[in-house]
Amino acid sequence: MLFKLEKLSHRYSDGTLALDEVSLNIAKSERIALLGINGSGKTTLLKHLNGILKPTSGTVYYEDTPLEYNTKALLALRKKVGFIFQDPNDQLFAPTVKQDVAFGPLNLGYSQDKTKMLVDEALKIVDMSEFAEKPPHFLSLGQKKRVALAGVLAMQPEVIIMDEPTANLDPRATSEILHLLLKLNKDSGITLILATHDVDMVPLFATRLYILNKGKIIAEGIPKEIFSNAELIRSVNLRSPRITHLFEVLKKEDNLPIDKQLPLTISEARKEILKLLENKNS
Amino acid sequence: MEHSHLYAQIDRYAYTNALAKCSPITKGFFAFSALLISVSSPTAIVPAVIFVIATIVTLYAAKIPLHFYVDMFTLPTIMLTLSCLFIALFFGYGEPLAEIRLPGFIWIIFKNGLNLSITTFLRVEGALSCLFFLVLTTSITDIFITLRKLKVPRTVIELSLLIYRYIFVFLEVSAKMNTAQTLRLGHSGFINRIRSIALLAGNLFIRTLEQGERTFIAMNSRGYDGNIHVLEDLPKPTKKAVGCIAIFDAALLVLIILTINIGVI
């Protein structure tokens, strides 16, 4: 197992119990979505994965070794586990894009030449090469997000953790980020873990998902299984993807002969509709 | 993103002007040597020459729009004119230039007072043109890296680097809060305005603390070890450029000696 969380609890200093005995496993090259409403503990959970937060009780294992919280061990962990924050302004602090992306590799002690190479490569992957010399305050939110991603990629991580990667982005920027992430996962086998409440995006992205509610994991599985349980989804104040909801209504209200496994994405819906038409004709 | 502030525009030109790729050491050498000569020149002609040349370089070599350049000069020139008027009216001795008869006493304007006033005016304008050349053509990143090369203490540079970046973040935040207050009539009437500004300032202060915390965490996540390392790829100053500037400075010094006894009037 790449990540293993064992009865992880976290209580903030103001007394709130943000995580309550959470256990989960994440294997290499998986694409994991943590789904939950605001305040369900997603961000707190993510922050344990690269040692930003220390559990109040329970243990985090990375590659079967429990995390240590000394400077050296954390540095080694953070080289492998990159973290992209929800607000790119938290992350982009350098006066130019290039300098910001170079921050991580230089901290790893790489030479100027090697760093330059990594920076160029990372900016190319996120398609921001032409902005290398620009200061971050010239960029749009979507561009800032991509630069933040480049900053992490330049450290050549094994895992990328993202907190709400598509929050506040326009549809185009959302789809760009999404495709970029899928490509990284496919080409380099980078494990992706993200927290989100964007239910329409989850089926396109995740191989597996966890549902968090009030600091507890209440469900785990592949998107198809989880989203076919509409009661469960609604009980935690989330909703099904729009497409799924439409098919649920068609099945319940209009008694159309639809599979128990409802389609989650446009392409699945298309197949389902074509099948229905075919059955009707024959 | 739109920035209406003058300083945000300066920042934009610093990154985009036609001399942005030129070595900051060359530009700094030109600006500071000419600035020193301008402020220490005893004659009025040399600062005038410096003003003209720095302006030509800024407008034609760096391609800064004229209207923007004029905008930058407006405020300091108004202040400067007032001060120089004061020098012209109240300073000087020796040969009188004009006498103004007022009831009860005679106000004398001296020739060397007027000379001093005009020289001061030109010195400052000359120095300003050098400084504006530097800020309009050199990005803050280049300045930081150059300062590092010049062995300025790390802490000073790193603090300036973070302050510089977050000025823009907080400008945006305060502009948003200001709009939000205006929309709820927070700026109607003097008392309301004072209260709203106080609230905004207090809130902004707390925000900066939170931002600091979050940025620190984000930096730690990328292996921050207490030092901010930067990529040092600056264009190198060419010997030719540095040589030309040195010759230019020498010519200015010679011009000072030649014109030392020539007054403006």
Image (spheres, coloured by chain):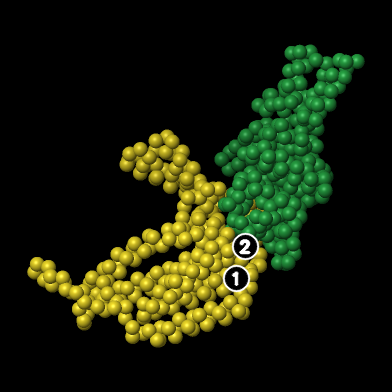
- The chain carrying label 1 is B
The C terminus of chain B lies in quadrant? bottom left
Disc 2 element: loop
How far across and how far down the image is residue A244, in percent? 75, 25
Disc assigned to residue A233: none
Q: Which chain is yellow?
A: B
Q: Is residue B36 something that shows in the picture?
A: yes
Residue for point 44% across, 83% down: B253
Q: Earlier in the sequence, mark 2 or mark 1?
A: 1
Q: Colour of chain A?
A: green
Question: Vertical placement of A271 versus A183: above or below?
Answer: above
Q: Nearer the viewer, residue A33 or A243?
A: A243
| Residue under the image location 79 percent in, 24 percent down | A262
* Mark 1: few/some/many CA within 10 Å (<14, 14-19, 20+): some
Instruction: Tell me the kind of residue under disc 2.
Output: Ile
Residue lying at 75% horizontally and 20% vertically, measured from the top left: A248
Q: Which residue is mark 1?
A: B23
How far from the left and from the top, in percent, is residue A217?
72, 33
Mark sitting on residue B228: 2
| Quarter assignment of residue A235 | top right
Q: Position of residue B63 (x, y in %)?
A: 54, 63
